[in-house]
Amino acid sequence: MYQITDYSFKQASKLGVHIKPSKNKNKKIDVFRDTKKIASIGATGYGDYPTYTKTKGKEYAEERRKLYKIRHEKDRQVKGSAGYFADKILW
């Protein structure tokens, strides 16, 4: 099971949402506004910025962040989408 980091909790707070471990076995986090689930984000088989920072260091994490943002340019710009929340909370 994915351990949600303080980084992700802080990022979610900035967006006015709260997060919990996902009930979907293929996702890391469920995103909620009030009591309504609005997205499941982060595929379990992949890394994210806080995980890379812990395991491989900040420099490596920054490079992975840059590549993620390039790769997901279209979906991360759609406000309120799962891609948007993944970008803002995990990256």
Image (spheres, rainbow, N blue to C red):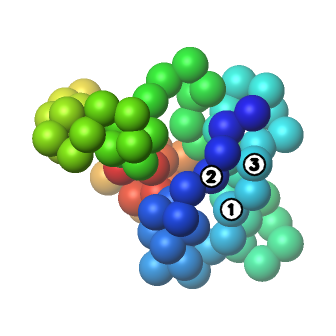
Q: Residue at x 84, y 72 (%)?
A: 35
Q: Secondary structure at mark 1?
A: strand
Amino acid at circle 3: Pro
Label 1 to label 2: alpha-carbon separation: 9 Å
Q: Which residue is mark 2?
A: 4
The image shows residue 25 at horizontal and vertical percentages of 79, 27
| The disc label shown at residue 21, or none | 3
Q: Is residue 66 visible?
A: no
Answer whether labels 2 and 3 touch (C-beta < 8 Å): yes
Location of the N terminus (image quadrant):
top right
Of circles 2 and 3, the one toward us is: 2
Q: Which residue is mark 1?
A: 19
Q: x, y percentage for residue 27?
A: 67, 33
Label 3 secondary element: strand
Measured as percent of width and height from the top left, residue 40 is found at 67, 44
Quick one: label 1, few (<14), some, or many (20+) residues within 10 Å?
Answer: many
- Residue 52, by quadrant, is top left
Disc 1 vs disc 2: Cβ atoms closer than 8 Å?
A: yes
Amino acid at pointer 1: Ile
> In the picture provided, is 20 more to the left or to the right than 28?
right
Identify the residue at image location x=62%, y=52%. Answer: 4
Question: In the figure, residue 44 lies in which quadrant?
Answer: top right
User: Considering the numbered disc 2 on the image, is that residue within a helix, a strand or a loop?
Assistant: loop
